[in-house]
Amino acid sequence: MPGWQDTTLSSPLNALMREMADDLHPEYNELPESHPDVQVLRAECMKALQAGRRAAGAAKAAQTRAKNAEKGITQVGLKGSTKQKRWASELRGAMLKAAGGDAGFASLVEHATASRFWIDNRKVPWSTLVARFLAVKAETDAAAAEAQEIMSRPSYGVDPGNVRRLDALYAVQCKLDRFLGE
């Protein structure tokens, strides 16, 4: 008796092959495992098993996303490894819950996309993070406005004073990037 027809085998693939052969192709029961028709049956059954596993995985993922959405946990917008994003999303979700609807915290969430930021600052109170962020962000916004003003002047050129000021303004932007862990 060929291996795929042996009912003592517990392989899901062999069980599905036996089931399909009994239902659709009873004549396959007499064919050896190496026969091309049996090989086609094996390929069809393998595809069906894989599709079932993918569907089960997708359903489980949707269930996890729904459960996490209730807790305020989402990995959307986070950068980092899978484990970092998972951990950071949990940390960020807990802080989000503690912060309520604070606009400053919402702005921080929008800008802090590095998982490392949330992991490194996991012990810092959300209000302290927001205060630090808003201070650096205000400095950066002022620097950006000054840079725009310098570059919009009709006399803008390669003036050493302009270059020094733009370098200083770029350093302020780098300060925000460092604060956010990017």
Image: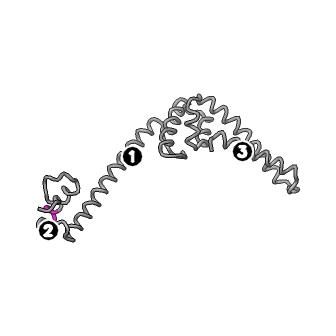
Q: Answer with left or right where residue 133 lies relative to residue 165.
A: left
How far across and down, in percent of the image, does residue 110 sit? 59, 42
Q: Amino acid at mark 1?
A: Ala
Closer-to-camera residue (156/7): 7
Q: Is residue 86 above or below residue 20?
A: above
Q: Residues within 10 Å of mark 3 (few under 14, many from 20)?
A: some
Q: Which of the two labelled residues, at mark 3 and mark 2, occupies the earlier sequence position? A: 2
Q: Is residue 73 among the parts visible in the rendering?
A: yes
**Quarter of the picture holding the C terminus:** top right
Disc sitting over residue 31 in the figure: 2
What residue is at 12 percent from the left and 65 percent from the top?
A: 29
Q: Which residues are magenta?
A: 21-28
Residue 5, image quadrant? bottom left
Q: Which of the two labelled residues, at mark 1 and mark 2, occupies the earlier sequence position? A: 2
Residue 34, image quadrant? bottom left
How far across and down, in percent of the image, does residue 82 sit? 48, 45
Q: Do the residues under discs 3 and 2 have CB atoms within 8 angstroms?
A: no
Residue 109, image quadrant? top right
Closer-to-camera residue (34/25): 34
Q: Amino acid at mark 2?
A: Leu
Magenta stretch secondary structure, dominant: helix
Disc 3: which residue: 173
Looking at the image, is mark 1 or mark 2 nearer the viewer?
Answer: 2
Disc 1: which residue: 61
- Distance between mark 1 and mark 2 Cα atoms: 40 Å
Looking at the image, is mark 3 or mark 2 nearer the viewer?
Answer: 2
Q: Amino acid at mark 3?
A: Gln
Q: Is residue 144 among the parts visible in the rendering?
A: no
Callout 3 secondary element: helix
Q: Residues within 10 Å of mark 1 (few under 14, many from 20)?
A: few
